[in-house]
């Protein structure tokens, strides 16, 4: 299946995105999105959509969420001038510091908003999935704050490589359920979380961690994460003297990237660049670069771009970063690629590790391995566009990645001092 749009259609769809008119009533971002779910979940999804319509932008809910984001999460997060990287790259580099948010990543914005929504909707428990563990930690913390029990499904592979986050979830009172089926990473965790929800669609709330899944999740997650882009846009004007020439964010499912990009879509002089996991090669199963190499298909409730073979079988993925290790991507990203408003690139495992090391050396900041992919491509872009102003979404901190980084160092695979 191929999806092609005329220039006129692309312009119209971008205008609708900027105006807040997408997704439409069917949950569609142009040809992407929708709600493809088991019949047993359709009533729960309809209740959720009605609850989102009723509460999300209501003054009382926004006041509660805003107060919690300020006093508990620590927003607004800082915009930091990266002096060391600016000197090295010959650019003016600025970092939107989601690593400084409570629990260490952007995930808390979405988890808190959905936990507060779940409580308003009368749910008795929360179900979640996690890859890198940051969404699991954020969900555990948000549910503790909201006074709700939660269970977090996590692929067994990710449990092994993200042990610090598993321990944090347990300390915060969550139940962690390792998933050994399938590829035992994020895709398998989402599958298992959906099975749990199917078994109890009325008493449980599924707190989805990225801008994927059936409607209304891609919209809900985008709205809760758009605080990143709104803050960054205002901070760039105040602190950097004007908008960025280019903004970068890593993309797995796509929540931090859509949170940064969506408020900037109307700023046509700002190039938007999403960076996926190029893994260790270009073949199926060697990377997680869905937008770079994927084709249209349905996964986890929506029509988007997927890593699949010619028979439509979803393929296993690879990335050194657990949070980017996913075979799909949010439908709004699929549309943004199709209409050409966002450019999507990929960075290899080696590129990301080198970028992580350089950020540590130049800025005294240990970024998450996911985030390091954005740094890798921003460096490439800066060398091709000297003197430009660059904004990077620093989506999370790298404490959680120390087991992986330590293994690589002990195996002699970690990069040396950055050039």
Image: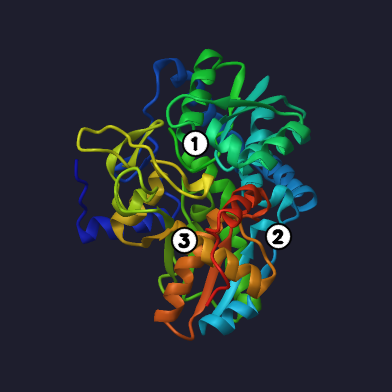
Report the mark closest to the observer, 3 or 1. 3
Q: Residues within 10 Å of mark 3 (few under 14, many from 20)?
A: some
Q: Earlier in the sequence, mark 1 or mark 2?
A: 2
Name, please, the residue furthest toward the front. Answer: 411
Mark 3 and mark 2: Cα distance apart in space: 33 Å
Number of residue marks: 3
- Viewer-proximal residue, 342 or 168? 168
Mark 3 and mark 1: Cα distance apart in space: 22 Å
Residue 113 horizontal/vertical position (percent): 65, 40
Residue 155 horizontal/vertical position (percent): 53, 32
Q: Residues within 10 Å of mark 1 (few under 14, many from 20)?
A: many
Q: Which residue is mark 3?
A: 350
- Give me the residue at 54% from left, 65% from top: 415
Q: Which mark is residue 61?
A: none
Q: Is residue 78 left or right of residue 319?
A: right
C-beta proximity under 8 Å, tags 3 and 2 = no
Q: Which residue is mark 2?
A: 76
Can residue 53 be seen here?
no
Q: Is residue 244 left or right of residue 394?
A: left
Q: Which residue is mark 1?
A: 186
Q: Is residue 25 above or below residue 380?
A: above
- Give me the residue at 29% from left, 38% from top: 308
C-beta proximity under 8 Å, tags 1 and 2 = no
Q: Secondary structure at mark 2?
A: loop
């Amino acid at each position: 299946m191929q999806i092609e749009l005329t220039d006129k259609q692309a312009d119209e769809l971008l205008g609708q995105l900027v105006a807040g008119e997408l997704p439409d009533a069917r949950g569609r971002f142009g040809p992407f999105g929708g709600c493809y779910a088991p019949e047993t979940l359709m009533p729960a999804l309809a209740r959720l959509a009605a609850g989102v319509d009723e509460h999300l932008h209501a003054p009382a809910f926004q006041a509660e969420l805003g107060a919690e984001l300020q006093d508990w999460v620590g927003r607004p997060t800082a915009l930091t001038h990266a002096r060391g990287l600016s000197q090295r790259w010959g650019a003016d580099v600025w970092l939107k510091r989601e690593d400084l948010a409570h629990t260490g990543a952007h995930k808390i914005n979405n988890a808190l908003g959905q936990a507060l929504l779940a409580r308003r909707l009368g749910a008795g428990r929360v179900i979640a999935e996690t890859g890198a563990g940051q969404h699991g930690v954020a969900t555990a913390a948000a549910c503790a704050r909201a006074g709700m029990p939660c269970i977090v499904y996590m692929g067994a592979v990710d449990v092994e490589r993200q042990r610090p986050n598993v321990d944090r979830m347990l300390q915060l009172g969550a139940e962690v359920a390792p998933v050994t089926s399938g590829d035992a990473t994020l895709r398998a965790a989402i599958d298992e979380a959906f099975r749990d929800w199917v078994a109890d669609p009325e008493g449980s709330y599924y707190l989805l961690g990225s801008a994927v899944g059936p409607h209304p999740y891609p919209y809900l997650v985008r709205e809760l994460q758009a605080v990143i882009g709104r803050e960054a846009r205002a901070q760039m004007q105040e602190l950097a003297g004007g908008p960025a020439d280019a903004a970068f964010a890593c993309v797995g499912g796509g929540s931090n990237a859509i949170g940064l990009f969506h408020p900037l879509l109307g700023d046509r002089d700002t190039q938007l660049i999403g960076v996926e996991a190029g893994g260790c090669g270009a073949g199926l199963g060697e990377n997680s670069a869905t937008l770079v190499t994927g084709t249209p298909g349905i996964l986890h409730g929506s029509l988007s771009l997927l890593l699949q073979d010619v028979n439509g079988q979803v393929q296993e993925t690879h990335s050194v970063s657990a949070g980017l290790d996913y075979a799909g991507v949010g439908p709004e990203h699929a549309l943004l690629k199709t209409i050409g408003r966002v450019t999507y690139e990929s960075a290899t495992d080696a590129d990301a590790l080198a970028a992580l090391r350089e950020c540590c050396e130049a800025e005294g900041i240990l970024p998450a391995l996911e985030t390091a992919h954005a740094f890798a491509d921003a460096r490439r872009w800066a060398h091709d566009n000297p003197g430009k102003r660059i904004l990077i979404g620093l989506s999370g901190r790298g404490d959680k990645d120390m087991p992986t980084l330590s293994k690589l160092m002990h195996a002699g695979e970690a990069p040396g001092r950055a050039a």
